Amino acid sequence: MEQRWLPVTNPPKGLAVREAAAMPSLVAQAGDAARFAFEEFFHGQIRNPHTRKAYLHALRVFSDWCQGGGIELVKVTPGHVGRYLDAFDVAVPTRKVHLAALRRFFDELVMRHVIILNPALSVRSERYQAVEGKTPEIAIEHARRLLKGLEVTHSVGLRDRAIIGILIYTAARVGAVAKLRRSDFYDVADQHCLRFHEKGGKVREIPVRHDLLEFLNAYLEVSGLRYSEPSSPLFRTTVRRTKRLTQNRMTADDMARMVKRRLREAGLSERLSPHSFRVTTITDLLSQGVPLEDVQYLAGHADPRTTRLYDRRQRRVTRNIVERISV
């Protein structure tokens, strides 16, 4: 009788059931070696939770497609992978992510002698080159209006102003802002800094400019968090509409909802998001002639080509050109 797959360690209550249920049937039915490769790949090799989630989703979708066609794991061919991608009606970048997930997982299966050859290795995806990101930028005058329109007579308004200020004046990702602890805001001689823990395990220290320093100090003073535990979250949720802060950390999703609400209150487009401030800051600095490598460092990009995707100067040039058409 085939042994049921379970994690090798004693997990927290309920985790074993969830992980077993998360294993795609295509893998679960392929034997012990395939199940071991799955566990090693997703729970041993991939440490980034976002990558793990995306790759696991890709494998589940492919598993369902194979199950629908009666295809076993060891009989998957490059033709199967190609036809699967052709039938997958999503954007090209999403197909590329799914193909990358399959290639890496099948590599692991080859290493563990589950299959002989990687059927996804020879499959090619469409070309895709992004010259500009899709995130809309928020106009500088709109960002100013948003900050000035916040009611700061209570701790929640001061909290929200501090969060939006950080998004603007540090170009930090909202996920990194959500991770900030009380100890991540500190002074070094005559300069205050914020320490961000970003994706990929990177830790960056960004100086706090004078007006952002005022935002943070006002928030800490009114909220009573100035002398809180160093490991406690810097930004906390509220008790419904009481404007009282809890001990719980605001998540990135909490902050995104807060930004959407504040945009709506200010009469601004709800297509904007926390990432829009990052786009505006990068574009503004490049427009002022700040060297690309300096802006790249502030944004925390490993590749300058990523920083260029945030540059909206060319869009402004194009808009001016089309407005001059005489028709």
Image (spheres, rainbow, N blue to C red):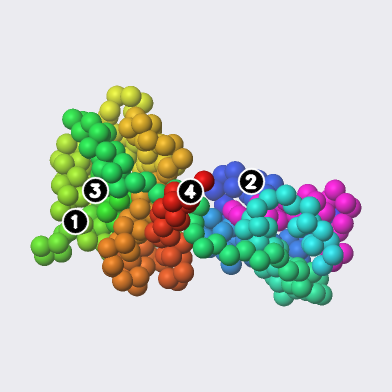
The secondary structure type at the circle numbered 4 is: loop
Q: Is residue 152 left or right of residue 54?
A: left
Q: Are marks 2 and 3 in contact (CB under 8 Å)?
A: no
| Disc 1: CA contacts within 10 A as few (<14), some (14-19) or many (>=20) | some
Q: Is disc 2 surrounded by few (<14), some (14 to 19) or many (20+) residues within 10 Å?
A: few
State the residue at coordinates (78%, 49%): 64
Q: Nearer the viewer, mark 4 or mark 2?
A: 4
Q: Viewer-nearest of labels 4 and 1?
A: 4
* Badge 1 or badge 3: first in the primary sequence: 1
Mark 1 element type:
loop
Give, as a three-letter code, the residue at label 1: Arg
Label 3: state its secondary structure.
loop
Gap between marks 4 and 2 measured at Cα = 62 Å
Closest to the observer, 102 or 225:
102
Tell me which numbered mark, 4 or 2, is placed earlier along the sequence: 2
Residue on which the image places disc 4: 326
Q: CA distance from mark 4 to mark 1?
A: 45 Å
2 or 1: tag closer to the N-terminus: 2
Disc nearer the start of the sequence (2/3)? 2
Q: What x and y, as percent, mark residue 46?
A: 57, 64
Q: For residue 108, which quarter of the picture? A: bottom right
Dot 3 or dot 4: first in sequence order is 3
Q: Is residue 145 above or below residue 46?
A: above
Q: Which residue is mark 2?
A: 18
| Residue that numbered label 3 is attached to | 229
Name the residue beneath numbered marker 1: 209
- The boundaries of the magenta stretch are 53-77
Residue 104, label in figure: none
Q: CA distance from mark 2 to mark 3?
A: 34 Å
Q: Measured along the vertical axis of the image, is residue 39 above or below residue 260?
A: below
Mark 3 or mark 4, which is nearer to you?
A: 4
Amino acid type for the residue under numbered disc 3 = Glu
